[in-house]
Image (tube, helix red, strand yellow):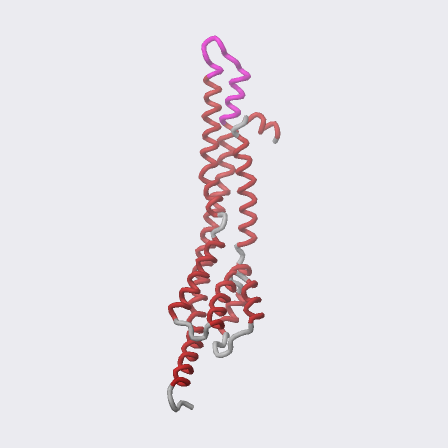
């Protein structure tokens, strides 16, 4: 491998760096973009059984916040209702939207870098090819034919082109795969948050009715 890198010349080193970065990002995204870390099935089942008449304690909300990305979004809504039981529907929806946007940013983390590597790697390989061709033509100048320089130029041209594609193809496939996962998780989080929002509004509406009845003269 070292001899191949030496034969490919200096243009191969940016591609080597891109390959290590892409590999690290791919492993990190495979670890992070798992259903149990984003939208655990157990949490979705508990959400369907949630009783808005009884708000959970602060410890339960903290555990929910640490459980998953969906838990962070739901915990934001719970904290808002616990802090202000008569919160307006619009304000509560804004709380969920802000939490959802933060969650989407976490899901999309590093995907731009991975996509950039998938785009740049073939161009870096092409750069190495052009440099190799320049050396080839330079070695064939009149009166200065140099077979060793010709072979070196061919090595630079071919190795860089091949390595650029070797880096780009897996990076592109993984980027597309992660992008599809993110879109699916976004939809699941949005649906779960919308369902939880309607459950919480039943609690806030009940709190508003109780406040109005308490403020009405002669109310029991």
Residue for point 55% across, 54% down: 32
Q: Does the stretch in magenta take in 196?
A: no
Reply above or below: 159 against 218.
above
Secondary structure mostly taken by the magenta-highlighted segment of the chain? helix
| Residue 68 left/right relative to 94 | right
In the image shown, does 29 or 100 lie closer to the viewer? 100
Q: Does the stretch in magenta take in 154?
A: yes
**Quadrant of the snapshot with the C terminus:** bottom left
In the image shown, does 181 or 206 lie closer to the viewer? 206
* Residue 45: percent from left, percent from top: 51, 70
* Residue 150: percent from left, percent from top: 51, 18
Reply above or below: 25 against 64.
above
In the image shown, does 218 or 63 lie closer to the viewer? 218
Q: Which residues are magenta?
A: 138-157
How many numbered marks, from 0 up? 0
Reply above or below: 134 against 75.
above
Residue for point 43% across, 61% down: 98
* Residue 160: percent from left, percent from top: 51, 30
Reply above or below: 42 against 107.
below
């Amino acid at each position: 491998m070292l001899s191949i890198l030496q034969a490919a010349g200096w243009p191969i080193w940016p591609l080597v760096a891109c390959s290590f970065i892409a590999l690290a990002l791919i492993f990190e995204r495979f670890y992070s973009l798992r259903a149990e870390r984003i939208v655990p099935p157990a949490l979705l089942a508990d959400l369907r059984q949630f009783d808005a008449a009884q708000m959970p304690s602060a410890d339960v909300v903290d555990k929910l916040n640490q459980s998953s990305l969906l838990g962070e979004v739901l915990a934001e809504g719970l904290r808002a209702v616990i802090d202000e039981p008569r919160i307006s529907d619009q304000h509560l929806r804004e709380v969920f939207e802000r939490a959802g946007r933060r969650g989407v940013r976490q899901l999309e983390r590093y995907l731009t870098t991975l996509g950039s590597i998938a785009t740049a790697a073939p161009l870096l390989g092409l750069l190495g090819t052009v440099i190799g061709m320049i050396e080839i033509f330079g070695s064939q100048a009149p009166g200065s034919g140099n077979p060793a320089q010709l072979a070196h130029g061919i090595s630079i041209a071919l190795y860089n082109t091949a390595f650029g594609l070797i880096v780009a193809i897996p990076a592109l496939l993984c980027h597309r795969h992660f992008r599809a996962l993110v879109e699916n998780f976004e939809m699941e989080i949005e649906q779960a948050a919308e369902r939880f929002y309607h459950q919480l509004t039943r609690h806030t509406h009940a709190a508003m009715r109780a406040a109005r009845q308490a403020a009405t003269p002669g109310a029991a």
